[in-house]
Image (cartoon, rainbow, N blue to C red):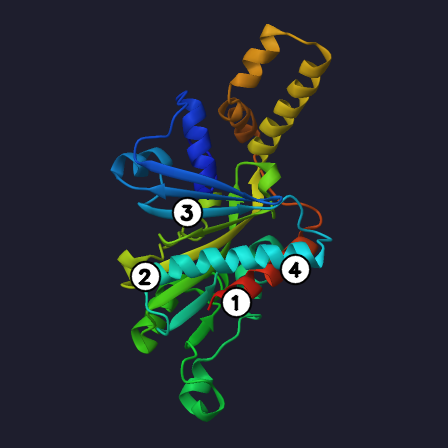
Amino acid sequence: MDFRTDMAVERRDLYRKANKIEDEIDGIECEEEELEDIKVTRVSVTNETGETALQKPIGNYITIDVKKINNIETEKEDKIVEIIAKELSKVVDKHIQKQEEIMIVGLGNLYSTPDSLGSRVVNEVEITRHIKLYLPQYIDENTRSISAISPGVLGTTGIESAEIIRGIVDKIKPKMIIAIDSLCSKSVSRINKSIQISDTGIVPGGGVGNARDELSEKTLGIPVVAIGVPTVVEMASITNDCLDLFIEDLQKKAESNDVLNKLKDEDNYEKIKGALIPNDYNFIVTPKEIDELIDSMKDIISRGINEAL
């Protein structure tokens, strides 16, 4: 299916539904964990069959789902931060040693709110490389060296983010990159309520059909861990979700209706998309409270990174 989403867990669920697979997909391993009202789903793509099914590279994808992010209680926020730090630490430790240098990369456009998450997170990350280089007496010798860069976007710099990052990597030689970016989801319910951590790199703009050069171990020569939060959804996805909710509501009132049941069981995304595209109505949409949501998620992601590293 030609749907827009950066979320591995969504691609897994949609592939199973489209192919009527009740068990796990060949080449995919999945485990779920409920931590109070926070759900952690760990999807591993283990071979080429799984890679083809999910259209995602072989590797690990962790999704942390929370029910509410705006006006969040301090205790709940601390719990989310703790889970992000734990999952990120496990991914980092798989690829590099405890004290090896990491470069944080904030992707996206600072001047477009839904796309500004990466740039905003970079401003909150605790940077240590310059202290270790120039003022080592003021820092613990076991402190990990952390640097950061927000390269901007091609439209404002005239340079691909991958080109900027490749030049910096060649110069300062970090052992790993952690890239933060805004993502696209196929589900309205995941907007600013899911965090995906993966160790397969990232293709900036891939989810909204504006793919730029890939950032990965294959292109940069070092592991690339990606942290992303869905901030936009396609109009066809919203319409499909609304249709599902409408049918569910009618089903509750009419205990059985074969037509509605059949419509509900089908994924109507492609039909809806086909109707919207000729009229240029298949917009990419973000919530009206996006400023507040990005601000909250920026704090949570940066705290999780700081705690993990």
Residue 7 in picture, x, y percent from top left: 47, 42
Q: Separation of disc 2 and disc 3 at Cα?
A: 15 Å
Residue position for label 1: 307
Q: Residue visible at 49% across and 46% down?
A: 63
Q: Separation of disc 1 and disc 3 at Cα?
A: 20 Å
Label 1 close to label 4 by CB (< 8 Å): no
Q: Earlier in the sequence, mark 3 or mark 4?
A: 3
Residue 255 in picture, x, y percent from top left: 68, 9
Q: Separation of disc 1 and disc 2 at Cα?
A: 18 Å
Q: Residue visible at 33% across and 67% down?
A: 166
Up-down relation of residue 274 to residue 123 (above or below): above
Residue position for label 3: 61
Given the image, on which type of amino acid does mark 3 rest?
Tyr
Q: Separation of disc 4 and disc 2 at Cα?
A: 30 Å
Mark 1 or 4: in front is 1
Q: Separation of disc 3 and disc 4 at Cα?
A: 24 Å
Residue 32 in picture, x, y percent from top left: 48, 40
Up-down relation of residue 208 to residue 257 (above or below): below
Mark 1 or 3: in front is 1
Q: Can residue 110 be seen in this view?
A: yes
Residue position for label 2: 95
Given the image, on which type of amino acid does mark 1 rest?
Glu
- Quick one: 252 or 224, which is closer to the camera? 252
Element type at mark 2: helix
Neighbour tally class for label 3: few under 14, some 14-19, many 20 plus, Cα within 10 Å: many
Label 1 close to label 2 by CB (< 8 Å): no
Q: How many marks?
A: 4
Q: Residue visible at 45% across and 48% down?
A: 62
Q: Earlier in the sequence, mark 1 or mark 4?
A: 4
